[in-house]
């Protein structure tokens, strides 16, 4: 269903029938419209539990991630194994009641960025750091990315966390609820 809705959304931007759209994927699996090269309409999709989040941008790459917040017993182990040294130290010093939510916040920010740059889960998550404070700068994989990319949190509801990453130093977010 998520892919069908994606076709409907993109067809409205492209002013065409959903069946006319054709897709391609890069070597890491990031999807794009075949026409994206010509008109630069780019998108990304994420889903978790009962929610799907779509991001559409014109003229810049975009990545998005949404996660259902649930008790996650392996959060500390994953942070220690896969996150940056800066994040490990910060996570260790968090009060235990904040660790679960912080893990999901960081994960969505990291995954949104990894998807935006087109490398997805092939990106070592310990090669860059995100902040636990919304809209703060992050330490990207490559130094030149510090001013090239921006990450913002997306408020869904109390059961989910989400983030969007896009090229550029500024981002205006507009939301529509598909029901």
Image (spheres, grey):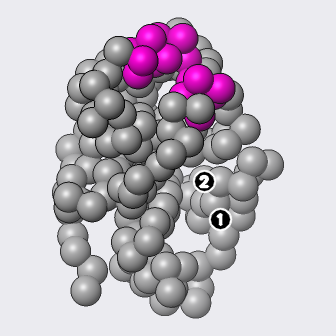
In the depicted structure, whether residue 141 falls above or below residue 11: above
Q: Position of residue 58 (x, y in %)?
A: 39, 52
**Quadrant placement of the C terminus:** bottom left
Q: Quadrant of residue 31?
A: bottom right
Please report contact status of discs 2 and 1: CB closer than 8 Å, yes or no. yes
| 3D distance between C-alphas at marks 2 and 1 | 7 Å
Judge whether residue 161 is colored magenta: no
Q: Quadrant of residue 123?
A: top right
Q: Residue at x 23, y 31 (%)?
A: 134
In the depicted structure, whether residue 49 falls above or below residue 118: below
In front of the other: 28 or 20: 28
What is the span of residues highlighted in magenta in the rendered image?
A: 78-92
Res. 171 visible in picture: yes
Which residue lies under the disc numbered 2?
37
**Mark 1, residues whose alpha carbon is within 10 Å: few (<14), some, or many (≥20)?**
some
Query: Judging from the image, what secondary structure is the residue with disc 1 in?
Result: loop
Would you say the magenta stretch is mainly helix, strand or loop? helix
Judge whether residue 82 is colored magenta: yes
Q: Residue at x 51, y 31 (%)?
A: 76
Q: Position of residue 172 (x, y in %)?
A: 21, 44
Name of the residue lying farthest toward the right = 27
Residue 34's tag is 1
Q: Quadrant of residue 100?
A: top left
């Amino acid at each position: 269903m998520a892919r069908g809705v994606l076709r409907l959304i993109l067809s409205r931007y492209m002013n065409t029938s959903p069946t006319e759209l054709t897709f391609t994927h890069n070597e890491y699996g990031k999807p794009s419209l075949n026409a994206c090269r010509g008109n630069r309409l780019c998108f990304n999709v994420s889903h978790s539990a009962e929610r799907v989040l779509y991001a559409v941008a014109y003229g810049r790459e975009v990545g998005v991630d949404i996660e259902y917040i649930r008790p996650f017993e392996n959060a500390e182990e994953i942070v220690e194994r896969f996150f940056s040294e800066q994040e490990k130290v910060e996570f260790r010093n968090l009060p235990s009641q904040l660790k679960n939510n912080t893990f999901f916040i960081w994960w969505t920010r990291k995954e949104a960025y990894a998807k935006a740059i087109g490398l997805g889960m092939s990106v070592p998550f310990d090669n860059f750091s995100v902040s636990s404070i919304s809209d703060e700068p992050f330490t990207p994989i490559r130094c030149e990315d510090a001013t090239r990319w921006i990450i913002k949190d997306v408020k869904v509801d109390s059961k989910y966390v989400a983030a969007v990453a896009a090229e550029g130093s500024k981002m205006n977010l507009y939301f529509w609820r598909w029901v």
